[in-house]
Structures are given as C-alpha cells and as structure tokens.
Image (cartoon, rainbow, N blue to C red):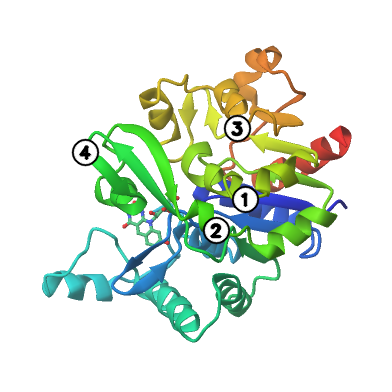
Amino acid sequence: MPRILAITGGVGGAKLALGLSKILSADEVLFAVNTGDDFTHFGLHISPDIDSLTYALAEQNNTELGWGRAGETWQFIEAMQQLGGDTWFRLGDKDLALHMRRTELLQAGANLTAATAQITTALGIQHRVAPMSDDAVRTLVHTDLGTLAFQHYFVREQCQPAVSGFEFSGMQDAQLNPVIAEFLNTCDGVVICPSNPYVSVDPLLGLPGMRQALTRLPLIAVSPIVGGIALKGPAAKMMRELNVPATASAVAAHYDGLLSGFVLDNTDAAHADQFNVPVLVTNTIMDSLQSKIALAQACVSFLQELD
Ligand code: FO1
C-alpha cells in the first residue's frame, strides 16, 4: 500500500480519516490536523480538531452532538453554570480530562505533537496524529460583528455572523510540524479530507514550505460540498458570504495548483466535466463505517492511478 498524508480538520475530515485508518497501517498514513481552532479556555489548551480526530480514530466520537466524546456526562459544566461561569463552550466530564491531561503535558514541557501522541496512545490509537504545527497559529474570522476568535465565531455565535475573510495569526512565525515535513519527503501521495477549505485546510496550506512540498506529490481533495451544501459546518454559508459559488468546482478552484485529482459525490456527477483535473465520482456521504472505508479505498486507488 502507498504511504499517504491525510490532511484533515474536524468532523467531516475525521470520518474519512477513520476509513483510511482501517485500510492503511500506522506506517502508511499520517494524519496532519488543523490547530487553527485551538484556544485556551478555563486555562486549558483545547484543540477541537485534534479532539474530533482522536475520538473518531478511537471510535468514541459523540455522533449525536457531532463533536466531543461518546457517553459523556455534564456534571462539570452544570456546576460551572451554577457558579456563574462560562458555559457557551460545553465541556463534557470525560472530554475535560483530555484537555486537562493535554494542558498538564504541555506545562511539563511537552510540545503539542508529543502531548497528542501520549493521549492517542492512551486511547488505544495506533495511528499517528500530527498537529500541523507545534507553534500557535490561531484562525481569526473577519465578520460583520468584527474580528472573532474562531470558537467565538463557530460556537458562541453559532456561525451566524457574515464572514468577509480569515486571518491566521502566528502563521508567519510558525514552523510546519517536522513530523509532517519528514513524512512528505517519503510519502507517495496526499489526500485533503472533506473539511472546510477556508478554516480547516487553509491553515495547513499556509504554513511555510507546505505548498512547495505538496506540489511535488500526487494530491487529491474530497469535496466537502455536495449538491451545493456542506454536509457538516458552515462551509457553504461562508462561500456564499465570500461571493463564491457554494459548489464542488469552487472548492477545486480554491485548491487550484495543488490538485492532481478531485473527488466528487454522485450527486454532482453531471458537473464532472467542469474540472481541469481528473475527477473521481463516487459516494462521499459517510453515514456508516462501511461507507468511510469504501471512500478511503476509492481515494487510495484514485491516487495510485494518478501517480
Ligand atoms: N461545538 C459546538 O457547537 N458547541 C460546543 O459546545 C462545543 C464544545 C466542544 C468541546 C470540545 C471540543 O473539542 C469541541 C467542541 N465543539 C463544540 C466543536 C468545535 O467547536 C468544532 O469541532 C471545531 O472547532 C470546528 O471544527
């Protein structure tokens, strides 16, 4: 099997990541995850996309909520409410332990990569989850309410404000995770999982040296837009607010220059001739483990054909 770098953000990308983890060994795939959503809350370092991927790979993700951990209890946040503390960002009791453990490891001198490795290993995950950088890069969202930190936009304001642009603070001083840089030197291809292009994938693409490394490799992206809607999250709304058509071909155009191929859902098969790269038309709706594995297999085969 080829060695693949999988670039992913939160929930949508994490579904394909689970599928890839079922067909590729820990040596054959590296998950490069967005950390632009990270923030400090109650003094804890919270990495939502790392958390979503971790719980997905551990098959302990909370499918009702679409984030956090399965089988969660909420004693902490209810007690926090009683004490008049912030409750807009809901931390479950078991999830809280993960943020506390990560914060403890970071405060003891571990970098985010090492802290993440300890946590994923403790949860029985064989595969490697690499934060895009061990340096702080934070996504800021320019909106009609002003510039918002990502979680304020996404959770506190529930993605309601109209966006006009994004900014990744710390990007110019951040280093691409050396684990990712090293893997890129020896891997056979790259899959951009179906995550939000603007706030989940662009932070990785913006890291110094990342685009240059990617242009040397076969790279495919799976459209996060199906039939003009985003299966999860605000991508289509953002596109409309940015005066970009909420279409799969607009996503492909966003990745222009990097793509060797593009993966479209069957719903959009009629548009397959609009692309200037080879297109794979398949089912990208991942509503079961089998569909996650099937899409992963289709992506790996597609990459191998393009090589
Ligand atoms: N998303 C919400 O919509 N509401 C929440 O209260 C919330 C809490 C939360 C706690 C931990 C965590 O890792 C993620 C959490 N998320 C919540 C999801 C998170 O905001 C998103 O997954 C990403 O930031 C966007 O991909």
**Are the residues tagged 2 and 1 within 8 Å (C-beta)?**
yes
Q: Of helix, strand and loop, which one carries label 4?
A: loop
Between discs 2 and 1, the one toward the N terminus: 2
Q: Residue 252 at x, y = what percent? A: 62, 27
Q: Secondary structure at mark 2?
A: loop
Q: Which mark is residue 145?
A: 4
Looking at the image, is mark 1 or mark 3 earlier in the sequence? 1
Q: Amino acid at mark 1?
A: Pro
The residue under label 1 is: 208
Marks 1 and 3 sit apart, C-alpha to C-alpha, by 25 Å
The kind of residue on which mark 4 rests is Leu
- Residue 85 in the image, given as x and y percentages of width and height: 16, 70
Q: Nearer the viewer, mark 1 or mark 3?
A: 1
- Compared across the picture, whether 181 is left or right of 227 comes to right
Disc 4 packing (10 Å; few <14; some 14–19; many ≥20): few
Q: Nearer the viewer, residue 179 or 196?
A: 179
Q: Amino acid at mark 3?
A: Ser
State the CA–CA distance, disc 2 to disc 1.
7 Å
Q: Which residue is mark 3?
A: 223
